[in-house]
Amino acid sequence: MSVAALPASMPRRRSAVLDFCRQQPLGAISFVIIVVMMFAGVFSEYAAPYNPLDIDFASILAAPSWDHLMGTDAFGRDIFSRIIWGSRTALVIGFTSSFIGSTIGAVLGVASAYFGGKIDDWIQRFVDILLAFPIIVLALVVVAALRKSVLFGIDMNLIYAIAIPIVPRVARVVRAAALSIRVMPYVDAARAAGYSNSRIIFRHMAPNVVAPYLIMFTAFIAQAILLEASLSFLGLGVTEPTPAWGLMLSGNAADFYREAPWMILFPGAAISLAVFAFNLFGDSLRDYLDPRFKT
Amino acid sequence: MLRYTLGRILQMIPTLIGVAVLVFFMLRVIPGDVVEVKLRGDGGNVSQETIDMEKKRLGLDRPLMIQFKDWMVGLATLDLGKSMWTDRPVVEEIGIRLELSFQVAIMATIFAVLIAIPLGTTAALMRGTWVDYVVRIVTIGGLSIPSFWFGMLIMISLLTFFNWLPPITFTPIYVDPIANLTQLIWPALAVGYRYCAVVARMIRSSLLEVLNEDYIRTARAKGVYEKLVISRHALRNALLPAITVIGIEFAFLIGGLVVTEQVFNLNGIGMLFVQSVSRNDFTLIQGMVMMIAAVYVVVNLIVDLLYAVFDPRIRYT
Amino acid sequence: MNSNLTRRSVLMSGAAAVAFGSIVTETTAQGPKKGGTLQFAISAETPHYDNHGSDTYATLHFAAPFYNTLLRFNLDKFPEVQGDLAASHEVAADLMTYTFKLHPGVKFHDGTDLTSADVKASYDRMRNPPAGVVSTRKATFADIGSIETPDPLTVIFKMKAVNASMLEHFASPWNVIYSAKDLTADPNSPKTKVNGTGPFVFVEHVKGSYVAGKRNDSYFKKGLPLLDGFKGVFTLQAAAMLNALQGAQVLAEFRGISPAERDRLVQAMGDKIRIEESSWTLNLLVCFNTEKKPFDDVRVRQALLMAIDRWGGSQGLSRISTLRSVGGVIRPGSPFATPEAELTKLPGFAKDIRASREQAKKLLAEAGVPDLKFTLWNRNLAMPYTPAGIFLVDQWRQIGVTVEHKQSDTAPYLAHMNAGNHDVAIDFSNLFMDDSSLGLAKYLSVARAPENRSRHKDAELDKIYDEHLRERDPEKRKAMIRAFEKRAFEMAYQQPILWWHRIVPSHKTVMGWKMSPSHNLGAQLEEVWLNA
């Protein structure tokens, strides 16, 4: 649908949000899902019917019912409550790691593009080295080696472990975006006119990288949630009894697939849905913000 | 072209050295060592002297810089040392498992590429239609579904609906192709779904970019058959970035393999990696990381060279 | 056979009187059949083949079929011992001399004859390992003075001091006999080379995949083994192992599975699967690091122990994990275990949990730490360490104590505890027999017992232990063990949470395998046959 098709009497400045919803319906749906998740994460205490840590040996492995919407696990803990609390874990880890990783990556990318020369070389070298590591080994070593510091019950070293692989990937993309500005003559002109580095960076380069930054930030929230799930599955991420979706799939959950398939189905579906929503949202955002794709 | 190639090869070396340094020092930071796990892991009450003696034998008591020097010297001569857990050469330990993982990786790649190209192309050509939406949902699904969960679901479905399980020990494909394929097709699927999604999305977006280019508009204006426009002009140019992605994702399949091999109990590189990490078998971890870094760097080189071959502008920068 | 050992006769009658769980037995119309290859699952892969230097069942399940020991446990009448390589054995009345007469005509797989020199070489290696050789049971044989070999079929062990458990130690499954020739050539050859006298000959080991052996046709026990061969498949994930059992790709797993896994197999396979159960010589302990405040205060330690509802908790835990039996320092149900009536008097074992918890809260308040916060250090294994940790956190929550549960892989888990950095940890005790010389060793002062995770020093405990080792009268010994237990628990350094329960699954076609309280026993497979 193009702007030209709108009746001429409509006000020119339409809300960007409404515009977005119309152009990218999938994006709007995913946004709604994200909002629901965030709601569940922020208001877990009220949204969850049970305390996620409450052990109840009398009703272990119970099937979904009105009492326990998603059934109970091997300890009798309500799965629905654990999923709700799990969204808090996922969102905190997702947002924080992605934010730290993307921001550091963006700073490195812009610095690399702006200063060029030796600095660019060294930063690129560093980025190359980081990219050559399998995510798992990087994540493992950071988790194990850094001294634990806990924020909201989440290991900060887990967050650093997930943030670090994000840095080089964002740095790469942001550098490319910033470079395309760098070569424009007006940057040289600004330099020649004596504007300080930081002013040039913030006034000219930065706005150009905001779009890719936002898109990567969203995309990497999805990656971070997935990475946390994998790490917890391997036993390296969040530990019991903290409710976390990946953790709910690990250990001997798979052993109960016959008598309690809900133990595996719901957490996996939650991870998939969350990551899906963020990915779709990032995708739609990119489609919306990229001027070349406006018909 | 030759100069460009040589230049790129030379650039590989500092990266590999950087990786070697980083991985060595990062590992030594971890608390706990392989000797403790070996001798006390199951509750044995070994004396401290025994532990110290074993540590000495493995060279773990020497100063850090000496161990580092040995490691770097060994690297230069392509000697990756011996696993601290089994005392067998690292190369041997990796070699035994490489065939399986490599085969799964190749199968996943074939599956991914065969499906991704038509999928991505269709989505790009029919942009905005329901076909595009469906493909987008399917591919984003591939990125979102944890591959280990997908693998679990596959195994459980096989058991519940068919009461059948894939073979539990590995037979090479030239010995018994049926046993081999029926075992490896499932992990290849589990890992391949995500791979396919990434490639399909890349093809879609790069094809969309190309389709907006001037020369496509010109070709269309000239009245060239649409099919020819697509296949001769658009696809060829769109494939190049896709090849980059295929290459890089292949090098990183190891990440997917690490969890997937756990789920399917496969004796591959991923499983070896998790085990060596949980045992603090430094030499084996170092060896594996170097191997993966080398693969990544070489793949990058090949991709860059391909770019240079297809896009003459690059050669001359 | 000398019968002067009243202790052993107690054990024999004790074993008869005290059941070790239910064993499902079937009678078959025919007798044992020869032939077939047994494919079974091994849940861990051993790093090397030397049982002298290993403490994991992974090495035993791998290598035991290739070797023999001097004596072994008679699994029909556990813990009685019977000869393996020894045709007969004699123990002097004063317990200072052990004489073994070997079977004639025993050959190693490479064709050489077994003589007493091989036995001597193997035991010398265990008690005095040469440089570069690891012997994990060196301390066990410290009491041996000398080993004499007057003729090729006789071995005489002369002790330096009385050790009432010595005979059981000779039956340890780890004490396999190697060829003296191999050991002289290379003391570490057993790590990579398999040359034994056992019922099976080594065929191949495909790393990460399986180990295979075939029948030893010149085995010295006529008519054995019954199988043509075996294949031990490494299934490193429990889910994979269960799937393989269900799919009949492996016919048994000889370590033990959890109740949930058992239920799944029974549901899926009906009467094709046989389940054998027994209490297990394994337990998990909770240990307080006495070198850290406030765990140096005995009131705090006692309070934390009293908050744990063992009797109630075991109901739930036994349904979802291998934890089951409430017991003290000795495996409950075995001859020397403390009866329930006495056990409930000790801190942590009272049945009235409400009163215990009130008492615990009072003690904490007295000690000045009513809202205690600490980290529980645990191993990163799903069964049963994770449930144990979750359980403890929940129990302590009920007396207002906030606990953070931290799990980690084996290597950092051990390192952290070795360095004494933990507050409270879950430790494990893995014994192959019930004998108190093994079971009590954990509670000795940390200078003597490196595996003491509460790092306490208690001279009195050490004294009782040393005396009881030399005590030959079983009643007196029992009394000493009780005294030891009472002191250890009143000082509350560390205490078993629960003892485990062993559940072994096997297809009904697998016959002749014998259940026992330890997964380290019964791995030789010489009497196993397939009723296909």
Image (cartoon, coloured by chain):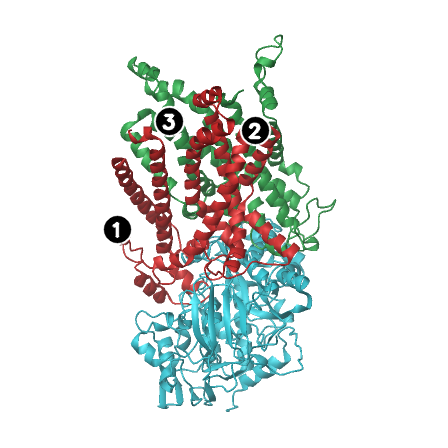
Residue under the image location 53 percent in, 46 percent down: B147
Pair 3/2: label in front:
2
Regarding mark 2 in the picture, which secondary structure is present there? loop
- Check the residue under mark 2 and report the chain it is in: B
Residue ID at (51%, 91%): C1
Which residue extends farthest top?
A: A9
Question: Which residue in the protein does label 2 denote?
Answer: B126
Q: Which residue is mark 3?
A: A110
Query: Residue C350: horizontal and vertical position, in percent?
Result: 64, 63
Question: Mark 1 highlights which residue?
Answer: B76
Is there any visible trace of residue C374 in the rendered image? no
Residue found at x 36% / y 88%: C149
Inter-mark Cα distance, 2 to 1: 53 Å
C60, C330: nearer the viewer: C60
Q: Quadrant of residue B32?
A: bottom left
Identity, as a three-letter code, of the amino acid under mark 2: Met
Say whether residue B290 is left or right of residue C355.
left
| Mark 2, other Cα within 10 Å: few <14 / some 14–19 / many ≥20 | few
